[in-house]
Structure formats: structure tokens, C-alpha cells
Amino acid sequence: MEVRVVKKNMFKIANPAIDTVLIMFPYNQHNLFVPGEEDWRRILKDTKENVIIIASPNGLKKSKPDISDSRLIITVNEMVFNYWEEIRNYVEANQKIRYIKIVTSDIDIERVKRDYNLVFSNSDKKFNVSYLMVIVQPSLWKKVYQIREKIVLMFPIKLYQALGKFR
């Protein structure tokens, strides 16, 4: 089934009209960042038919944008590093893609930037990357995950990758 999903996603991304990829990186832990209707309106504000959205199944668990399925890629990977590697395969499959917009929360933006840079550092293609950061309301769980992110950022990359594989 996984191969079939990847082939279907590759077909969607190969659309020659697509030049922009919007990557969702939401956390669903304790519902800290679950995009609602207003969030999707803001995220999709300047998008036209030239955009495709890439999100993990977990990222769309509670909400889905009001767009056609032909413009939505749901990844087969949830693990962070594998998620980025799958995304890289998709965006490199379409030579017209020049723009990447990453949507993330203020909890994990530093790790998202680091992971993007690690996975795309040896890419032959250079993208114009921008970030849309959503501010999560203060709470105990937000603080817990912010501390977790600081700890994860201190891990050596090899340890970080190994932990992601066995989580």
C-alpha cells in the first residue's frame, strides 16, 4: 500500500503547474497546534492553483484544508527525518518547484529549520524557502514541548536520527 500512495503522490507533484510546495509541520501532541478554519484561511491566503500541500497523516488528524485532494499530499512517513526525506523526493521530482513554504508552530521552528537544512544541504536544487509560524497559546504542555525541543536540538545528529528510527 505504501508504494501505491507514493506513486499517487508523485503523480500529483508532477503537475507542471505546480511551482510552490506548502509543508505542514504541526504537532498534534495535546492538541497544541491543530489548524482550524481560520488558520487554513491564513495559511492558504496567497495560494493559487500552483500550490500543493504536503502534510503527515498525524498533521491532518483533526483538521483538513478545504482544497481538492489533487492539491494535497499526505505522506507515508511520520518520523521527522523520514518525513523530510520523503518531502525531498517529492519536491525534487518536479523541476518547476522553486518555492517552499513551511508552516510550523513557535514550539518547534528551530528544529524544523535545522532538519530542513540537514536534508536539503546536498540537494542540487536550491529553493526559495519561507516560514509561516503559528503562535501557540501559553500552557503547561507548550512549555513541556519547548523544553523537549531544546533537548532534542542538543543531540548529536546521528543520535537524533537513531532515536527517530526506533521511536
Image (spheres, helix red, strand yellow):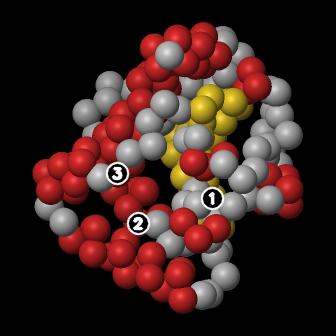
Task: Tell me which residue sits at (53%, 80%) in the image.
Answer: 142
Quarter of image, res 133: bottom right
The reply to whether the C-beta atoms of the residues labelled 1 and 2 are less than 8 Å apart is: no
For the residue marked with disc 2, what is the amino acid? Glu
User: Quick one: label 3, few (<14), some, or many (20+) residues within 10 Å?
Assistant: some
Q: Secondary structure at mark 1?
A: strand
- C-alpha distance separating marks 1 and 3: 16 Å
For the residue marked with disc 1, what is the amino acid? Leu
- C-alpha distance separating marks 1 and 2: 13 Å
Residue ID for mark 3: 115
Q: Position of residue 99 (x, y in %)?
A: 58, 36
Is the residue 6 above or below the residue 162 in the image?
Answer: above
Q: Secondary structure at mark 3?
A: helix
For the residue marked with disc 3, what is the amino acid? Asp
Task: Tell me which residue sits at (40%, 66%) in the image.
Answer: 110
Q: Position of residue 48 (x, y in %)?
A: 81, 33
**Mark closest to the chain's N terminus, 1 or 2:** 2
Residue 152: assigned label: none
Is the residue 104 above or below the residue 146 in the image?
Answer: above
Q: Position of residue 138 (x, y in %)?
A: 62, 87
Q: Secondary structure at mark 2?
A: helix
Residue ID for mark 2: 110
Is the residue 3 above or below the residue 121 in the image?
Answer: above
Residue ID for mark 1: 132
**Mark closest to the chain's N terminus, 1 or 3:** 3
